[in-house]
Amino acid sequence: MRRSPKKSKNIVFLSILGTILVIVVSAFILYNRAKLPMATAEKEAVTIAKKYANLDKETEFYRYNRDATYFTVAGTTKANKKIYVIVAQKGGKVKVLSQSNGKTKNDILSYIWNEKKPSKILNVGLGIYNGVPAWEVSYLNKKKDLCYETLQFSNGKVLKSVENI
């Protein structure tokens, strides 16, 4: 017995639709699982910042990877003081910085855009570099080569520059 052409087209259409649906759902699940460790790290860093630095409101979260990994929470205290709380991933050491005592993310980005003229900024993070609080910016230059700039938090001095990776 032969199927009608209409039923065959419906079966093909439903098969394609089902395959697309499986792909979309799988991609969504993989994406959420990939983000889970960073979301967990942020939640833990905020909890630590609230406990050790009286953080009241979180405004930004940064990840810094150099010799060690640091998670930094930017925000305000209950006394409305703007702070950065840097938490070491291993050992959980906490360093609290007043935002007014150093360069902000916007200061650092302005420097990078004006001096390095990148085609794209990939990441900005605040952590500890050789015992000193520092901003690290990864970016692509005009040739699309990967570059890193590490700048001291207190004064914006360039601590390390790696270009054309």
Image (cartoon, rainbow, N blue to C red):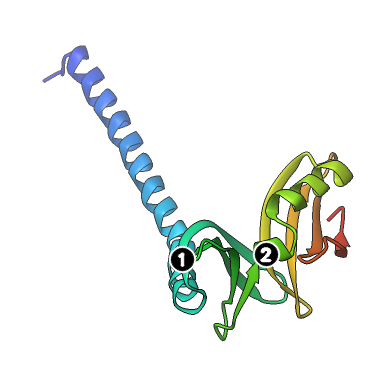
The residue shown at (75%, 48%) is 109
Distance between the alpha carbons at the discs numbered 2 and 1: 22 Å
For marks 2 and 1, the one nearer the N-term is 1
> Residue 104 versus residue 164: which sits nearer the camera?
104
Select label 2 or label 1 by which is in front.
1
State the residue lying farthest toward the bottom: 91
- Residue at the spot of label 2: 126
* Image quarter hosting the C terminus: bottom right
Q: Quadrant of residue 19?
A: top left
- The kind of secondary structure element at disc 2 is strand
> Residue 39 versus residue 108: which sits nearer the camera?
108
The residue under label 2 is which amino acid type?
A: Leu
The residue under label 1 is which amino acid type?
A: Lys
State the residue lying farthest toward the left: 1
**141 relative position to 128: left or right:** right
The residue shown at (69%, 53%) is 105
Pinpoint residue 9: horizontal percent, then vertical percent: 25, 18
- Residue at the spot of label 1: 78
State the residue lying farthest toward the top: 5
State the residue lying farthest toward the front: 79
Pinpoint residue 104: horizontal percent, then vertical percent: 70, 56
